[in-house]
Amino acid sequence: MDRWDTVILGAGAAGLMCAIEAGRRGKRVLILEKSAKPAEKIRISGGGRCNFTNLDCAPSRFLSNNPHFCKSALKRYTQRDFITRIEKAGIAYHEKTLGQLFCDGSSREIIDMLLADLADAGGQLKLETEPSPSSALKTAIVFARCATRSPAAPSLSPRAASRFPRWARPDSPTTSRDSSD
Ligand SMILES: Cc1cc2nc3c(=O)[nH]c(=O)nc-3n(C[C@H](O)[C@H](O)[C@H](O)COP(=O)(O)OP(=O)(O)OC[C@H]3O[C@@H](n4cnc5c(N)ncnc54)[C@H](O)[C@@H]3O)c2cc1C
């Protein structure tokens, strides 16, 4: 039986980035994607050329009820970090207007870069797979939850836990039975 530290639902931009970072931190990571292809939204983004960042990206450019919300994330990973990554991957790009950066070729290059980064980080991707409260997948999520409850990681708040199906919650009585499936 495969065991995973982290199971991510959805191979979009967010899921791929999370999986790559988790893999680079030594986690055994699996992405489950319900569609036949990953990152379909990236593919159609920017009219097929993916407006992948903006030179002037800054917290003040984000609309939010909490203007501080994005500050730490933007500080830890800047547009410059992503541009460096694009350049390292050899993806040609250009500035259109107002600091918007687009691929010269196709958004497909961004997807290929992310998939290559995922593979390099040891992450795995399963397409056409959607979780249901059954069998191995249930077990995988239980393991993922166990990992998030390791001493090194914060445990789920009751509010966060309530977003999981009942069978997947940390206090679920089905946990021990399912994890031995
Ligand atoms: C036409 C268009 C053009 C755009 N252009 C740009 C642009 O140029 N620049 C820009 O920055 N942004 C652009 N965006 C926005 C950008 O594409 C999205 O914000 C971004 O791709 C969202 O990424 P995500 O990972 O959050 O979500 P998604 O890309 O929606 O990824 C979620 C993934 O999860 C999968 N999924 C959902 N539920 C389940 C489940 N239960 N089990 C398994 N898998 C599941 C979905 O199939 C999907 O693959 C554009 C969007 C559109 C629609």
Image (cartoon, rainbow, N blue to C red):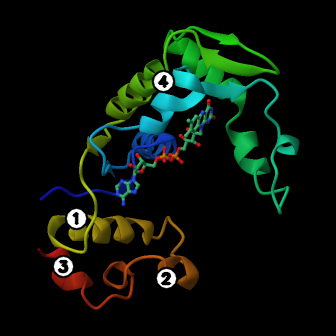
Residue closest to the eye, 81 or 167:
167
Q: Earlier in the sequence, mark 1 or mark 4?
A: 4
Q: Position of 3 compared to 45: left or right? A: left
Q: Outermost residue, right direction?
A: 60
Identify the image quadrant of residue 147: bottom left
Task: Residue type at mark 1: give it.
Answer: Leu
> Is residue 50 in view?
no
Q: Earlier in the sequence, mark 3 or mark 1?
A: 1
Q: Is residue 173 above or below residue 135?
A: below
Real-space CA distance between mark 1 and mark 2, rounded to the nearest whole angstrom: 19 Å
> Is residue 72 in view?
yes
Q: Is residue 140 above or below residue 41?
A: below
Task: Tell how many labels.
Answer: 4
Residue identifier under label 1 = 137
Task: Residue type at mark 2: give it.
Answer: Ser
Residue identifier under label 4 = 110
Real-space CA distance between mark 2 and mark 3, rounded to the nearest whole angstrom: 19 Å
Residue identifier under label 2 = 162
Residue 178 - label: 3
Element at badge 3?
helix
Task: Residue type at mark 3: give it.
Answer: Asp
